[in-house]
Amino acid sequence: MKHAGKAVLAAVAIWATPAQAQRADENAVLEAEDGFGKSVGNESIGIYASGEVRGFSATAAGNNRIEGLYFDEQGGVTDVIVRGSTVRLGLTSFGYPLPAPTGIVDMELRRVGTRPVVSVEARSGEYLGPDLVVNAAIPVSDRFGVDLGFGLFDDEYVSGASAWFRSYGGVARWRPAAGVELTGLYGRYDYGDEEQAPVIYTAGAYLPDRIEQRRFYGQDWADGSGHAQNYGGIVKATLGSWQIAAGAFNSSVTRDSYYSAYIDGVDRNGDGRSFLIAGRDQVSASTSGELRVSRVFAEGPRRHRLLASVRARDMEQLYGGYDLADLGAGTIGVADPVAPLDFDFGERTDDRVRQSSLAVGYELRWPKLGELNLGLTRSDYRKEVRVPGVPATVQQDRPWLWNAGLALTPSDRLTLYAATTRGLEENGVAPNAAVNRGEALPALRTRQVELGLRYALPGTWRLTAAAFDIAKPYFEIDRRDGVFRQLGEVTHRGVEGSLSGQPVAGLSLVAGAVWLDPRVTGQAVDDGRIGTKPIGRTSVLVDSSLDYRLPFLPAVSFDIRATFEDRRVANAANTLYLPARAIVDLGARYRTRVSRTPVVIRAQLRNVGDVFGWRVGSGGGFTLLQGRRANLSVTADF
């Protein structure tokens, strides 16, 4: 950290004049438009996130965007270049050409203002793992600016495992002419000493016993390392009635050393068999992008927009060659170190996906009447998998996909809408608990139908609600042979709602809720191999956040986030559930100035009641729920 401290001082010394705020003003509650999902900086609120939108993962489905443009994310994008992200679905996705089932997660890159700013944020980190982040926003001229950032993170987890991360990157924007902006981005993080706490698989329909938090019981020498990298460019131009938007990106993640630990067949006493999966040089890289051209026509009060879009990606994954070590008898929560092992790694599988999509769309906006969106897409998908010693297999699909949405505004306050979407989504690889771990899975044809409304209540209140029906093929571990394969079709029918507003001056409230009815159908259900509900789903999820700035002391604000989730399905047979739980987080901000520098002191206490629980993943593996933890940060915008 000594070198990092010198770098901070050097960066701060660049500017001696007061500057506009950058990180100090970040506040997810104040910036959220609804309660569906918003992240700003390192804080997130809402019922949805990239890993769970209406019960599915938008990231796994390939529905990420960077400032509205298609992006096939393989390695996570560091927040030293991303300011935040927003979950777009229902009415909020109407402005996005060619929406996708499972929603869209759109990332916003950092942007330079009119004055130079160096933001320094020091955090204690959860479980006292210290973090340091620095961003320098440099307006080189009134047309060109660069935001540079780096971060050092010493992460600690509820399992007692830890890892270090080093993150750096930048965003450059150039406006060579009115209505034209060119953006370049580069971001990377390196990580190491990544310990892996064992995933727990019980031998029957019961949960693991309670274990002590913050006690690591994996193997200290089984540390993972690697890096993730993202770079690319964006061009956006408005030339009269023509609009051009193009983006090209490269996203990759490399796991130089990889370990995954689990304890299988755990009995009611916590005893089972301990295993460790090891791998080397696991690589996933994708080049993707989109070119979109549109033309706007005005006809009296009506506004028509025609668009054409080309999307493409070329993804290659090198995975597998794992070695599985049987470590013998093991007890959950109890350390049992063994000497470092020599692993015999095999050849890796080469998995390559090439996909291109040609689309046309039409939008009609009629003030005081409504909006119409139509889209038609021809997708060409090809996956080639080369498993060592086995002839190559090829999967191809050329579906026609479409989307249609209609919104009507019978009054100034009320908007009603209906929409339907057909999609082709990526399906990832089989999980580590499966016999065919790491095996590439076929793409999924998906569909979604939804109805909803938005109503502007008196004052600043806004209500949004929708009913939806989503269907996809269902993949899970087959209990007959341990193979992860398609076992039927899963449908998610549900109702979601959001309420946001400012009931009194200084008080902001954002709340969201979803009621979900997930169902699996197919031969595996009829045979009794699996139940009718998919693993990991819950029927009720509520998330509410409140931020209140004291009227008599405006430098101080308090915030509360409360979440509730109903019980979650914990095994394929539907004979085991995680209990329902409610979690409350408390926080406070104190805003001041040191000389002319804005400073924010932020304190948070998460999971105030220290609710103990388990999370369940694919295949029914259990990991610890985050317990009570505190975080203190100081942010200054020089």
Image (cartoon, rainbow, N blue to C red):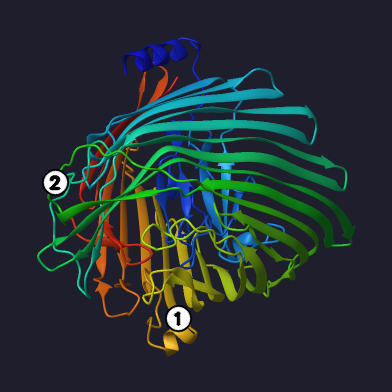
**Identity, as a three-letter code, of the amino acid under mark 1:** Arg
What amino acid type should be assigned to the residue bearing mark 2?
A: Ala
**Disc 2: CA contacts within 10 A as few (<14), some (14-19) or many (>=20):** some
Give whichever of 503, 242 is nearer the camera: 242
Q: Is residue 370 visible?
A: yes
Q: In the rendered view, would you say 245 is above or below 115?
A: below
Tell me how far mark 1 sits from mark 2, CA to CA.
39 Å
Residue 262 spot, x, y in % from top left: 27, 55
Please state if 504 lies on the left or on the right of 373 as rendered: left
**How many numbered marks have been drawn onto this rendered protein structure?**
2
In the rendered structure, find residue 335 and report the number of the disc placed on it.
2
Q: Quadrant of residue 440?
A: bottom right
Tell me: 337 left or right of 225.
Answer: left
Tag 1–tag 2 contact (CB < 8 Å):
no
Q: Residue furthest front?
A: 389
Secondary structure beneath label 1: strand
Pinpoint residue 121: horizontal percent, then vertical percent. Answer: 38, 28
Q: Which mark is residue 519?
A: 1
